[in-house]
Each structure stands twice: as C-alpha cells, then as structure tokens.
Amino acid sequence: MIGMDACKDMMATLPVGPGALVAIALVAIVLLNALRQVLFKNPHNPPVVFYWIPVFGSAATYGMDPYKFFEDNRKKFGDVFTFVMLGRNITVALGPTGNDFVLNAKHSDVSAEEIYTNVTTPVFGRGVIYDCPNHRLMEQKKFAKSALTTNAFKTYVPLITKEVRKYWFKSPEFFGGDSNKISGRTNLMIAQPEMTIFTASRTLQGEEVRAKFDESFADLYHDLDRGFTPLHFVFPNIPIPATFRRDKAQKKVSDTYMEVINERRRKGKLDNPDLLNVLLKEGVYKDGVRMTDREIANLQIGILMGGQHTSAATSTWALLHLGADAALRDALYREQLEVCGSDLPELTYENLQNMPLLNNTIRETLRMHPPLHSLMRYVRHDLQIPGSPFIVPKGNCILAAPGVPMIDEHYFREPLRYDPNRWVEAKNQISLDTTDTSTTITKGAKSPYLPFGAGRHRCIGEQFAYVQLGTILSLFIREFDWTLLPGQEVPKPDYSSMVTLPSAPAEIIWTRRQSKEKN
C-alpha cells in the first residue's frame, strides 16, 4: 500500500498542463517517426535518409549545403537514395547515369511542370513556361530560339559593349560619373545582376524595353528572384514580405512589357528582329492559337531572368576567381592583345570565337559553379531505376544534381582547383583532363558536364550566355586589373536561393589598366 500511495503522489506532482501534454505528444510523434523508419523499410524502394522531425525531414541539412548532403549520403547509400523535405519524398540519382535517368526521362513518366509551377508561375505569370501544357512550352522555346542566331549574336556584341561602358560610367560601384577615377572597390553582387539585366534587355528585347529599365527595375528583378526560394517552392503564397514584393514586382514588370507591346503595335514597329518582335509576329502555336500579349509579356520575364541568372552568377564567380589569380588575368589580357590587336579595337563576335582561354575560363567557372544545384521531376507512375533493384513510387520526386560529377575526381583531376587550362577543344566534344582518358563531354544527358541541363528542358540560352559572358569578361580584362579584398579568398557558395551565388563579401578592388601602365 505504501508503494501505491507513493506512485499516486509522484503522478500528482508531474506537470500535466497543456504545454506539457503538447511536449509529450511531440516527443511521441518524433519517436514513432523514428521507429517507423527503422522497422518498416520497403526493400523495393531506395534507402531513405534518416530524419527525426516528421514532414520537415532533411530540409535543413540539404538546404545549407546540397553538395555536402549529396556526398555524405552517397557514401552511406550509393548513387540512389531518398530524402524527405517538407512533406515531399525526393529520390536522388547521382552521377552521369543518374543525370540521364532524370533529365532524359519520358514526359509520360515524369513532369517538370508539376514540380516547378508553384514557384515559377507567381514569378513569370500565367500561360508560360510551366503554367501551360508541355507541348506549349516546347513551342515557346522554339519561338525564342529564332532570335538566338549567329547573325543576331554579331549585333549583340557592340550593344553589350555599349551597355557595360554606360553602366560603369554611371554606377557608384565603378566610376559614378567620374571618368578620371582610376581605382575603386566594387560589390559584384550589386554590379553584375544590374549589368546583366541591362545588357540582356537591350539585346534580346530592344531599345524601348532597355529605356524603361533603370536601377529600380534591377531591384524589381531582384524581388522576383527572391521568390525563387526553397520556402516558396513548397508554400508559393506564404504571406511574408518577400512574397508581397514578388507579386508587386511581377505586375509592374509585366505591365511595363505590355506598354512596349502596345506602343509597337500602335506604331507598327515590328521590323527589328529582337525576341519581342519575333513573338509578336510569329507567336502562333501549331494548333493555330496565337499567344496573347500578356503571355508574351510574361514570357519576356522568364527569358530575361534565365539569362540574368546564369550570366550574373557566372560572371561574378569568374571575376572572383580571376581576382585570386594574377597570372591568369595576365594571360587573358595577352590573349586580348594577340587576337584583337595591340590597340584593342572594338570587340567583335568573331574575336570571341578565337579566344580559347576566355571561353575555357567560362567553361571552368560553370563547371565549379553551375547556377542550379538540383533539377527535379514529379514521378507520374512507379519507375524502375535502370541498373538497380529500386522502384521510385508514383508521387515521389526524382532529383538530378549535374554539379556532382563536375566536381568528382573520377572525371576531373583536382576537381576543386580552378584551372581553365584543363579544357582542350576538339571538334564538337571536349576531352577532359581526367583519370579516365576515354571520358568526353557531349550535350547528351550522360555527360559529366551539364551546366545547362539536358533533355527536353535543356536551357536554350547557352550560346547567348557565352556571348554575353565573353563580352563582359573581355571588357573587364581590357579595362581593369583587380584583386580580392586583402586577406580574402574566393567566397563559399550561398545556397539560400535556388541559384547558387557567392556569399558575402563578393567584392573586388580594381585599378584601371591605362592608369596602371602609365605609373
């Protein structure tokens, strides 16, 4: 009896208020979730990364450093495994074989639209990209390709040159109106997004569009970019300031394109072969349906953001790596002199094609810093993973990480060393400086080098990106010598956005070459 009385007294002293009950329930849920993972494994499905918190899963560890997350779990499970992120089961397939499985999958088996429309539709707008049937998207890409020709690129180089110089002169990050300024300090994460927006809008969309863009419009595109977060990926309309700014920016930018479209139609100014005019004249689908003006305006947002993302991130990374390597900067400057002439006349498209070191610098930057670390598809029905016993269940997502083989020593010797000289051009494929001398790079999904993706959703802007990046980097090389901040190294990546950017401080200290050579 004494024992029973003691138990009753102990129970009476336990904290059984509402807060305690909630805590007990949460602990029980976590423990049951852990037991379920340990006791109930499906041998036909890929192994699952263990996680404590239901629904939330591995979101934190994946989001902080996706490449470390991939590598840690690859060591445990191999190239195929599943993790839980905010209620989604995501099956990762790594390596060139995994890239091929995900990126070359049939549209009847997987869907990009069902994954990305939550995050892209609020940013781009209705009726375009992933807010339309896949066959419509394929036709939209075809319309856009007609403005990305060699003849167009030849006209783009002088336009980009003019825009870059205009930006340097006006921007406080550079000369700020003082043409006699000989040195300065620049935050590249301010300068490069603005510069690439201006150059891309002028070349792809015409003079009237560029005339409406100023630094405030670059800020609007930044607000749109901040709508591409993992949080918005799951909760597209979550009521937070970033969501409100995104929606306001989308309406303002789309309305601005509508103003240009209406003006062109009113004046009949449809002769200039820029992308906007191509769509106004030729934007008719195979079934006879014409794109609406609002859809054309929204598509301009998607196309410009695609170009801006790649070029802003890649040019920033390239300038940072070059800031840490004086010998490479000097070699690039010598290449400019040798190809263009000692007086460095105006740059041309043909010049860019004859600068292997410049183009290899871009390739190497994209190898180490591909803009997107993860490419996902929604699984429409159970899928067998080739070469494995595993089946990915319907409703899961599959994920390719093209950046993983690009920093894998099996394909690239010393993969974390920035070395443009590892690339040697040979016809239409590039032999790698690898441990496997038979490895080559192609545009197929099994290639270990896929900075622009592969398959039906491969980025169509690769050649434009090389023209834009090549011109911008050439102008930097001609005009400046530069270094990183004293004591600084090339920054670590920041994975807080969907696009991989350098973390702060992404700054350089520059000196104008002309003034340096006089001293």
Image (cartoon, rainbow, N blue to C red):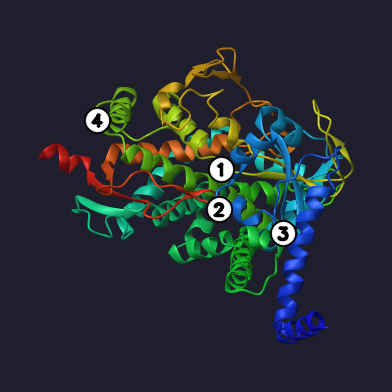
Whichever of callouts 3 and 1 sits on the residue coming sooner in the sequence is 1
Residue occupied by mark 1: 68
Tell me if mark 1 has few (under 14), some (14-19) or many (20+) residues whose alpha carbon lies within 10 angstroms of its own. few
Disc 2 residue type? Met
Q: Amino acid at mark 4?
A: Asp
At which x and y percent is residue 503?
A: 43, 53
User: Disc number at residue 86?
Assistant: 3
Of helix, strand and loop, which one carries label 3? Answer: loop
Q: Which residue is mark 4?
A: 343
Residue 328 placement (x, y as % from top left): 32, 30
Side of 257 where 178 appears, left or right: left
**Crowdedness near tag 3: few (<14), some (14–19) or many (≥20) residues, C-alpha within 10 Å:** some
Q: Nearer the viewer, residue 227 or 181?
A: 227
Tag 2 residue: 64
Q: Quadrant of residue 44?
A: top right
Q: CA distance from mark 1 to mark 2?
A: 9 Å
Q: Label 4, label 1: how many angstroms apart (C-alpha)? A: 47 Å
Q: Residue furthest top?
A: 438
In primary-sequence order, the first of circles 2 and 3 is: 2
- Label 3 – label 1 distance at C-alpha: 19 Å
Q: Secondary structure at mark 4?
A: loop
Name the mark nearer the viewer: 4 or 2.
2
Which residue: 31% across, 61% down? 172
504 w.r.t. 250: above or below: above
